[in-house]
Every structure is written in structure tokens, then in C-alpha cells.
Image (cartoon, helix red, strand yellow):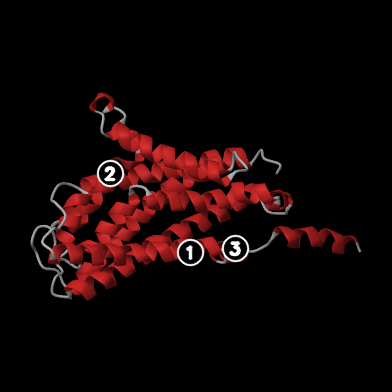
Amino acid sequence: MTATLDAAPVERWSVPFHRLYRAELRWIFRRPRTLIVLGLLALIPVIVGIGLTIAGDSGAGPGGGDGDNALLASAAGNALVLPLATLGLTLNLLLPLVTAMSAGDALAGESAVGTLRGLLLAPVSRGRLLLMKALGVATFTLAAALLMAVVATVTGLVINGTGSLFTLSGNTLSFVDALGRVALAAAWVTLQLWAVGAIALAISACTEHPMVVVVSMLAGVVVSTVLLLLSAVDWLHPFLLPQSWTAIADILRDPIPADQLGEGAIRAACYVVIGLSLAYARLSTKDG
């Protein structure tokens, strides 16, 4: 009888992590607002592609310039540019807000409705709980970036055809090479979103209001963007996450310059570590 009583708690503590992860994904992707957001993100490349086509036919295409403007200027006749242009445009504001929304629902949202307290009292360690939430947010951001990349690629091929796959350096790419560059762009953008999600989770662990997370991340992105325009605080620029976001255009160059892309990836990884560490520090002392 004693052995039976002692064995029961052991089974409760040995819940497989993949079951927790699947349950978290079901909770995320069954939310109506999650499906609505993904649907709206999928519409953006189509709208941009149609708009650029109409502007090109009327002779009023987008002007040239650097970063996103340069991408848009060449997207009208290049099927490879549209995926990177839409990812670059939405990375400046929309995708971080979507990521903050997911992170706000992960902890602050559940704390507001009272379900987080039950999870904290359940026989699951705080570290596993945070890892489950972080992977859920990461999976959602990966799905969002991949969805936009796939829809934009299909839209670009339908509008411009497979014969218009060339880099900004003027070299024509094969279909497989073009898909590889789109996949690289989606992976790099996803890593930036993971950094945003980690910071948003740290904020989400400190509040019961998901909108506080969204507004905080919106303020952070806007303030960082403004600071990047000020040469008086150029010493601060290397520490700001959006510093390398315009480097996504480098993926369309031949050969691909890896300095800005690599710096942006390292910076994002540091943000992930810092954000998750702060979230764990708060979650480990949280009782509901």
C-alpha cells in the first residue's frame, strides 16, 4: 500500500514534455484571433503584389532608395523580391506586434483569466512551463513568417513568372536557389521575432493585462527606430534590436554579405537569452 502511494506522485511529475507542447499549440492555434491574424498576414503579400503591379502598369512605381524602398522599387518585376520586401516591411512594426500579442496571451492572458495559477500549482516545474510557453510563441512566429514567405513567393511567381528570379546584383538564380534565399530570409526574420517574443514574455510575466505587453513592445519598437535616426546616440545603436532589420535586403545580393546579417542574428540571440532569463526570474517567484 505504501509503495502504491509513493509511486503516484512520480507519475504525475513525469508528464512528457511533448504532450504539454502539443496542448499549448492546440490552445494557440484554436483561438479565433490567431487564425484571423494569420489570415490577415497571408493577405499582405497579395495586396502588395497587386498594388505594385497596378503601379507598374500605370508608370507610377515606388521610388528608389535604401532598405525597404529599394526592395519595393525592384519587386514589381522580380518574383524573388516580393517575399523579402513583405517580410522586411512587416518586420518594422506589424510582425513584432503580432508576436507581442502571442506572448501577452501566453502568460498575462492566462493570468487574467486565472488559468496560469492552476499551471503554477500543477506538478510541472517553472522552467518547463516557461519553455512550453516560449516554444509556443516561437512556433506561432515561425508559422507567421513562413506563411507570409510562401504566399509572397506564390504571388510573385504568378505575377512575374519563374523567369524573373534574379538578385539585386543582376545575377539570375535557379528556382531552387531562389527558394533557398526565401527560406533564409524567413528563418532570419523568425529569429528576430523570437527575440521580440522573449522580451514580451518577460513583460507578460510581470502583468495580468495582455494589452500592456502589446503597448510596451509597440513603444519599444517605435523608440528604438527613432533612436536609430539620431546620430547623437550612435553609441547606443549596436544594442538596439532593430539596428540590423534593414539587412534583410542583403540576402538578395550576390554574394550574400554576412556581416550585418550575422550581427543581427547574434544580437537577437542575446535578446532571447536576456528575455527568457528575466521571464524565468519573475515566473519562479510568481504564485498566480
C-alpha span from label 1 to label 3:
15 Å
Decide which of tag 1 and tag 3 comes sooner along the chain.
3
**Which residue is depicted at the point 70% across and 44% down?**
288
Which residue was labeled with disc 1?
36
Foreground residue, 85 or 17?
A: 85
Q: Relative to 131, is 78 on the left or the right?
A: left
Question: What quarter of the picture does the N terminus occupy?
Answer: bottom right
Q: Relative to 128, is 137 on the left or the right?
A: left
C-alpha span from label 1 to label 2:
29 Å
Can you give x and y, in whole percent of width and height, for residue 213 in the image? 52, 43
**Which residue is depicted at the point 31% across and 57% down?**
87
Identity of the amino acid at label 3?
Trp
Q: Residue furthest right?
A: 1
Determine crowd level at label 3: few under 14, some 14-19, many 20+ residues with C-alpha closer than 10 A. few
Please say if the residues under marks 1 and 3 sit with CB atoms less than 8 Å apart: no
Please say if the residues under marks 2 and 3 sit with CB atoms less than 8 Å apart: no
Location of residue 165 (image quadrant)? bottom left
Query: Residue 244: which numbered mark, if any?
Result: 2
Which residue was labeled with disc 3?
27
Give the secondary structure at mark 3: helix
Location of residue 57 (image quadrant)? bottom left
Q: Relative to 42, is 137 on the left or the right?
A: right
